[in-house]
Image (cartoon, rainbow, N blue to C red):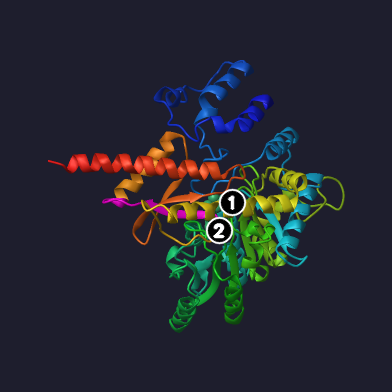
Amino acid sequence: MLDDMLDYLEHIRQRPVWQPIPPAVRAAFKAPLPEQPTELAAVHQTFMEDILPYAVGNAHPGFMGWVHGGGTPVGMLAEMLAAGLNANLGGRDQIPIEVERQVVRWVRTLFGFPESASGLFVNGTSMANLIAVLVARTGALGTRVRQEGIAASDTRLVAYTSAGAHGCIAQAMDLSGLGTASLRLIPMSERYELNLGALEQAIHADRRAGLTPFFIAGTAGSVDVGAIDDLDALARLANSEGLWFHVDGAYGALGMLAADIAPRLKGIEHADSLAFDFHKWGQVPYDAGFILIRDSALHLDTFSSPAAYLKRASRGLAAGSPWPCDFGPDLSRSFRALKAWFTIKVYGTAKLGEAISRTCALARYLQMRIETEPRLELLAPVSLNIVCFRYCCQDPDIANTRIVSTLQESGIAAPSLTTLNGRVAIRAAIVNHRTESADIDALIQATLEIGAAHSKTHMQSKTP
Ligand SMILES: Cc1ncc(COP(=O)(O)O)c(C=O)c1O
C-alpha cells in the first residue's frame, strides 16, 4: 500500500488530473453491507482500481480548481503514524497534545500573537470561523448567552464582512443563532478589497438604528480572486469602534511564511482571532484547519463545560487541564497536529514559504500569457495565486462554462468556475507545490483549443 501511494505521487503527472467516474464503478459502491470478510489484498485492489483513479486529483500539478492543497509524502506518512497511534486528542495527559501545543506556539510566533493566545486544530476554516464568531458572541453578550441563548438578550448583534468573503462567514452567523440577516456584506473596491468607507458608514447606520455592531471579518486571500483586505486599517477601525477583529485567512494567512507576501498581511497581528488552513498553502494533507484566539480566557469561557466523566485531576491520565475539548465543540479529535508538525519540521518554514511564493510567480506567468493572447481576457487583478480569465467569443458565459467542464474531462487541467461582476470566469487557483510553468502552458493551450472548437460548433449551428 505504501509503495502504491509513493508511486502514485511520484508518477502523478502521467495520470489525468481528473476523469469522469464510469457508471459501473459508481454502481459498485451500492453493494450491500458485507456480512462476510473480504481478503485485505482484494479490498486494496478495489481501492487501486475503483477509488484511486477517480479522486478529485488535487495532488496533481494540473489541478487548479477551488483552493485545494497538494499534500506531500511526508504528510501522508505522518497521517499513517497518527492512525497507527489512534490517539484521541480531546484531552488527557499525553504527548500528542504537547505536539499540538507546540504547533500552537509556532503559529502564535508566526502571526505575532501574544503568548497568552490559544489555538486549536479543527477540520477547516469553516469551523474555525464559526468558533471565532461564537467566542466574539460570548465577548459581546457574556457567558450567560450559553445558558439563555441570544433570544434572552435585547442586544441585536451585527457583523460585517466583504461581499467577496467566503460563504462560511454567513454560515457561522446562521449556526451561532445570530442569523445571516445580521451580517452586512460590504461592497468591494475595484481590487476586490473590502471598501473601508462603506464599512464605516454601515457601522454608523446600524448604531443609529439601535443595533450593536460587534464583529468585523477581514479576508486574507479571498476565495474568488485572492484579494487581501487592508488588515491594518480594519484593525484600527475595529479598535476605534470597539469591535472584534477576525481574519479569515483560510489560504492566504500562511503567506506569512513567504518573504514577498508577509508585508502585505500587516495588521494580522492585531486580530482578535485568525482562521486558516494548513491543508491549503501549507501543503499538509486534508484536513488541518486552525483557529487562533487572542483572549484564551474568553475562548475557554465559550466552550468549557463541567461533566463528571471529564473530571480533571492533578495526576494520572486526567491531568493536563485545560484540554483541547475545552476550546471547541469537538470531544473526539484526531491527531491532525502530527502531519502539520512533520511538514513544518521536515521542510522548514523557509522552503514552505518558497513554495507559496512560487505559486504566486506562476499566477503572474499565467497573467502574462493571458495578456499577450488576444483570444483570452483577464477578468480580475492577480493579487496572489488566483487568476480569473475567459475565452473571448460571442457567447462567453456559455462558452466558458463549457470550456471548464471540457478542460476537467480532458484530464489536462482542472480549473474551476466563478462569476465576477456577472461574467463567467475560468478560475485557476495555483496552490500545489508540484505545479510548474509547463502546467500553465498546458492550461492555456487546452483552453484555446477547446474555445476554438466551441466557437466553430457555435458558428456552424448558427449557419442556416
Ligand atoms: C477565504 C476562505 N474562507 C473559508 C474557506 C473554507 O475553508 P474550509 O474549506 O477549510 O472550511 C475557504 C475555502 O476555500 C476560503 O477560501
Q: Separation of disc 1 and disc 2 at Cα?
A: 8 Å
Looking at mark 2, is its residue's CB closer than 8 Å to ligand 1? no
Residue at (64% x, 58% y) in the render: 255
Q: Which residue is mark 1?
A: 359
Residue at (71% x, 43% y) in the render: 339
- Of 145 and 251, nearer the camera is 251
User: Mark 2: which amino acid?
Assistant: Leu
For residue 32, side relative to residue 406 (left or right): right
On the image, the x and y values in percent for residue 13 come to 56, 33
Q: Determine the secondary structure under disc 1.
A: helix
Q: Which residue is mark 2?
A: 384
On the image, the x and y values in percent for residue 296 come to 72, 64
Q: Which numbered disc, 1 or 2, marks the residue that appears first in the sequence?
A: 1
Q: Residue furthest right?
A: 315
* Quadrant into which the C terminus falls: top left
Residue at (51% x, 45% y) in the render: 440
